[in-house]
Amino acid sequence: FKEEVATADCRGVGLGLTSCKTFALCIGGDVWLEKTKVCTIDDCSGGTTFRFCLPGEIVKTRPTEHITPIATQRDMFDNIAPSTAHPNSSHSPHKPNIESDKEQNSSSSDTLAEITTKYEQAVSPTNLPSNDLLRLTTFYIIEDSNVIRRSIILKLRTVSRQIENSEWTFIEFPTVESFLPSLQTVVDSLSQKIAFVIDENLDSQGGQLRGHQLINALIQAGFDGLIISASGDEISAKKHRECGANLIWGKPLPRVPRILETLRLAWENNSQSVSKCIEA
């Protein structure tokens, strides 16, 4: 493990492994590396395996049940509201989370719904024609942070509401390795408009492969959709641009009108086989 401060980081991915090990040791548990394997685009099976050993007991609940905190002698959890387990709260490496902008996700919190409402009130519809170039789009979001993935989907859903009769689908993967088994199927989906939103560093979820490696793999496989870099730093953005990304978005994402504008320009360039990277 690398040396780091034993606190949650600011990217929304929770505690690092070093922090987990520190806290595990404090309660009589441990975290250790069992095996590791270098992954490549051609061979992404295996990877790094960590083992966790913690004292306690396993509590099983159904997706609709609440997990009630267990009070300690000092009742330190008395004021914590119960959380709700949801089948989409964790991501299996080969079972991506798929959502459509036509659906209301039952796991969305009241706060998230309130933010969405404010977005809708702030941006007026453009009343674009039903045959709009962006009307049918599937977004593959390759990002290791659960929080950032949710924020990207929230923003893109707001963008989709500016397009009449839009049907946008969002498919999430936490690492490049978890997506690779679907690579050829996606490339062969010629009847669909597909866009990738790709982060560079995905190691918080155990990913060894980087975002620029996925961009190279997509282009080599003949992918003709949009590739959007959303790494959030200039060095990675430059690398993604050199690899062939069509769009560069920062973190946080640009404003809704700018996203809509750049998506439209990028698709127009793509349809005319114009090789040009657009920055927002």
Image: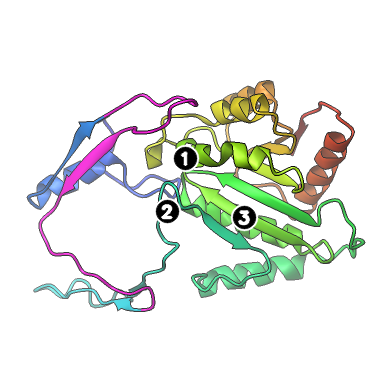
Whole-Å distance between the Cαs marked 3 and 1?
15 Å
For mark 1, give the secondary structure: loop
Is residue 224 shown left or right of residue 26?
A: right
Whole-Å distance between the Cαs marked 2 and 3?
14 Å
Residue contact between numbered discs 2 and 3, judged by CB atoms under 8 Å: no
For mark 2, give the secondary structure: loop
User: What colouring does the structure picture have?
Assistant: rainbow
Residue at coordinates 57% horizontally, 55% vertically from top-left? 151
Residue located beneath label 2 in the image: 91
State how many labels appear.
3
Residue located beneath label 3 in the image: 170
The overriding secondary structure of the stretch rendered in magenta is: loop
Residue 27 lies in the magenta-colored region: no
Q: Is residue 272 above or below residue 145?
A: above
Q: Is residue 239 above or below residue 140?
A: above
Which amino acid does the dot numbered 3 rest on?
A: Phe
Residue at coordinates 32% horizontally, 78% vertically from top-left? 66
- Assess disc 2: are there few (<14), some (14-19) or many (≥20) residues with their C-alpha within 10 Å of its C-alpha: some
Q: Position of residue 72 (x, y in %)?
A: 12, 72
Say which label, 2 or 3, has the lower sequence index. 2
Q: Position of residue 128 (x, y in %)?
A: 90, 61
- Assess disc 1: are there few (<14), some (14-19) or many (≥20) residues with their C-alpha within 10 Å of its C-alpha: many
Say which label, 2 or 1, has the lower sequence index. 2
Q: Which part of the image, by quadrant, shows the N terminus?
A: top left
Q: Residue 204 sits in which quadrant?
A: top left
Q: Nearer the viewer, residue 11 or 56?
A: 56
Residue contact between numbered discs 2 and 1, judged by CB atoms under 8 Å: no
Q: Nearer the viewer, residue 89 or 147?
A: 89
For mark 3, give the secondary structure: strand
Q: Which part of the image, by quadrant, shows the C terminus?
A: top right
Which amino acid does the dot numbered 1 rest on?
A: Thr
Residue stretch rendered in magenta on the structure: 36-64
